[in-house]
Image (spheres, rainbow, N blue to C red):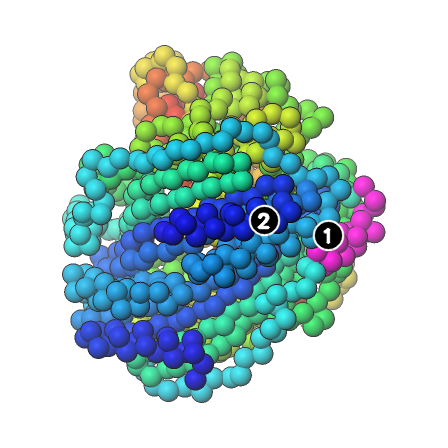
Amino acid sequence: MDKDLADFALDYATSKKVEYAEVRAHKEDHQELVIKNGVLDAYASMVDSGFCVRVLANGGIGFASTNKWTREEAKTIVNIAHKFAKMARRRKKITFAEEKRMKTDWRVPQKKKIEDVPPETRIETLMEVDKALTSQGINVAARIFAFGTNLTEKYFVNTEGSVISSYVPRISTYGFITVVESGKPEQASRQFGYAGGWEALSQWRLTEEMIHEAKVLQRVIKEGKAVKPEKMDLICGSEVTGIAAHESCGHPMEADRILGREMSQAGRSFIYPKGPFWLGTKIGSSIVTIVDDPTVKNSYGYYEYDDEGIKARLRYLYKNGVINEFLHNRETAARMGTRSNGASRAINYDREAIVRMANTFVQPRDMTEEEMFEDVKQGVYMRTFMEWNIDDKRFNQRYVGREAYWIEKGELKHPVARPVIETTTKTFWSAVDAVSKKVEYEAASCGKGDPMQGVPVYTGGPLIRLREVYVK
Amino acid sequence: MSDALAKTEEVVKKGKALGADEVIAKTTFGRYRQTRFSNNQIDISVAWNDYATDVVLTWKKRVVATLIRNFQNVDENVTRLFKLAKVSKENPLHGGFAKGKFRYQKSKADRALGNLENPAEYVFEAIEAAKKEAGPTTNAGGVLLTRLDDVHLVSSEGPMGEDHRSSIELSIRAFSQKEASGHGVEVGSTIKGFDPASAGRKAGEIAKLAKNPKAGVEGRYDVIFDPLLAGHLVDMWGSMTSAYNVMIQQSVFVNKLGQKVASNIVTMRDIPASYSLGNRVFDDEGVPAKENVLISKGVLKTYLHNTSTAKIFKAETTGNAGIVMPTPWSVEMDAGNMSKDEMFREVKHGLYLTNTWYTRFQNYAIGDFSTIPRDGMFLVEKGEIKQSWKNIRLSDNALKMLNNIVGISKERQHVHWWGFDWGLPAISPYVLMKDVQITRPK
């Protein structure tokens, strides 16, 4: 990565009539392999690097990027970005919230360096998972595993004097399996992610987890019973708690949505100025606190400074059941008269940094898991989910259980086949009457932006218990 | 031979000189320009210049790939790739890359789309059209994207060619109230005839009709799908014909070749023609891209293949490589024989749905899924729109829905927007489907 060229681009942008300019350079060393039905499809290895410039001029924003590292090209993209910024002809001029300049260099340490792990080891690791999975006497008719590592080096400079370098290694695995029993298929997918080194593998327990998934699917096919649709208690496992926190708390609390900037793509929010929901409005029971925290060590969504050079910190989104703090970048913070809380992220040099989550989860409380179940007369324990979606206001949502069990008098009984909860954000979080004390995380790629930017995140939480919700 | 093609050939020669069995290099010089807007104002305009060469080589059936930017460090990159092949693992299902010399159609890309003058004017025209339909307080957002790709492909197995691919798409969502919106798109491969106002008008028309929505009612309905929503479904069904998706069972078409999978009136094709957003003259192996009939009168005719999947399925490549995964380019549903008005007259008690997003499956192989209608969604009584609805979900089965199509319009629209989960452009008609399950939150 040619930092001098990035500095040159910034200097050249400064020579224009601009209110603000920044240059962000990325270098990605990426390796990925895909194993399909026990066969290595392909192994890809590449190093990609480029830089972008974002200019604020005449109250408009222009952005341009390139992967051609020449001074001539740097001038070209600065000129385009400057021209584009002026083209906006905005009535309401864009400004950025005032922030401190920052000079720092941060890195995520690795216990076992990804760079030192040869391709053969990577391939064998995944092959062994596939081999173990198909040695269980279960008909896993289709399997696909995608395994990837990213070593991301960034360099950020802006006209306010910030200079930030960073290095983040990330490692991820995606698995999708189909189990067929008596001619009937059931499917499961899992994602694993980690910021750090190869030590992730020992924490993930890939083989055990995927075998568990296969056994669950087989049992659901053999023993799963549909639930009689009615109101009942529902205990959500960490994975279900996490997706609900992500979809119905994290997304609607993104300030760019609230202000309408994503209106035609990812949508708006049920929270909007002068609407029924705003900061201070009750949205759930008083024991529900949902945070977004980029600083969870080794988390998939970990970062120390965001892509506008703002220091990352924990954000209390819903606090004790009340809408508390939105996720901001500098543009949205200025519009709402506040400060950025470091939520601006981009997946690469060719993408604009926009408001994103990092690791969104329900904060734990004091109940043991046994206590959560013991006074449930009848209900469903939805440990994991398969199908899910939510409307573009982030209010009408649905989760369909993958691993789920009938609860009777506090005890787990037979598997429940694909139980469904289809409800609203307020109904869901208001029904929570108990939260357990152990948080577990699930890795995910959060999709937003146009073009789409899938950023690494954790979702998660403890078990939560919902009283008297409609399950079908 | 262009300079870029010559440099691309050098990459291939380098790989062969090292001892690779097969090498394909594909260089793309892409110029992309995007203008995003919301609240009737431009938020950001973006330019990407992309110089990239995708390289795939095989050695003893070990398939490895890399990306070289701007022809930098070619020797080092290809050598590293070849070393990777030597320590990689054999893919016994690799069937080789396509062999032979091919003649390609002449590309008809519109080079004006490489650097469109005044893109903001197109945006303002669309916004004004939406306001004209839905009123001066209409709040609109969206995106204008132009693309020009110069593609240079060389394969050690014979294919060599150049292609130029262009597209322009405008997507606009207009809000007449906080919970009343409409979405319109205008897409194509050339600036000629491009009409941003038509997208704005459509968005505005629907937004106006969508005012004061009531909570929808669960049940089974006859549903008219607007071409934008029908395009989303066409996108989904088309993607499921990829042989790769069949192999990993992310498809409802597993083991269904030659079988009836849809209503008799359904014919679907993949057509990478020059008019399409997905235009191209060859695939990623250099095989000429061509029209493929996917479903003919309700019968599944083919999966989409590259050379390797074709060998597995004892078929011929369909010109849809993806080196690893074959993919459709642009899926079309054939026009039917009904007018839009006739279709509405057929509906005694049903729905008209204009758009959707967030389609997710609980089981791809069986086809059970749900998706969330957005923008205008309407109760239709005796052929007339009676009420605007909100807060509903379509929760049904992908295969059953294909079989429940009872009407297809004569008119079709070229559609694509950000919310298409499979990302493909489509050309789709209005579609009338019976017995569609609608659910809502409780």
In the rendered view, tell whether residue A396 sits above or below residue A411. Answer: below
**Disc 1: CA contacts within 10 A as few (<14), some (14-19) or many (>=20):** many
**Snapshot quadrant of residue B135:** top right
Q: Residue at x 53, y 72 (%)?
A: B165
Q: Is residue B384 left or right of residue A219?
A: right
Instruction: Please indicate whether residue B26 sits to the left or right of residue B36 in the image.
Output: left
How far is mark 2 from mark 1, CA to CA?
42 Å
Apparent side of residue B172 relative to residue A421 in the rendered image (left or right): right
Query: Element type at marker 2?
Result: loop
Residue at the disc numbered 1: B203
The x and y percentages for residue B297 are 54, 72
Q: Nearer the viewer, residue B171 or B360?
A: B171
Q: Is residue B127 magenta?
A: yes
Report whether mark 2 lies on the same chain as mark 1: no
| Callout 2 amino acid | Ser
Identify which residue is drawn at 52% across, 75% down: B164
Task: List the residue tagged with mark 2.
Answer: A15
Residue in the picture at 56% in, 54% down: A78
Judge whether residue A253 can be spotted in this image.
Answer: no
Count of labels in the image: 2
State the image coordinates of residue B225 (x, y, percent, origin top left).
Answer: 65, 56
The part of the chain drawn in magenta is B120-137
Amino acid, disc 1: Ala
The chain holding disc 2 is A
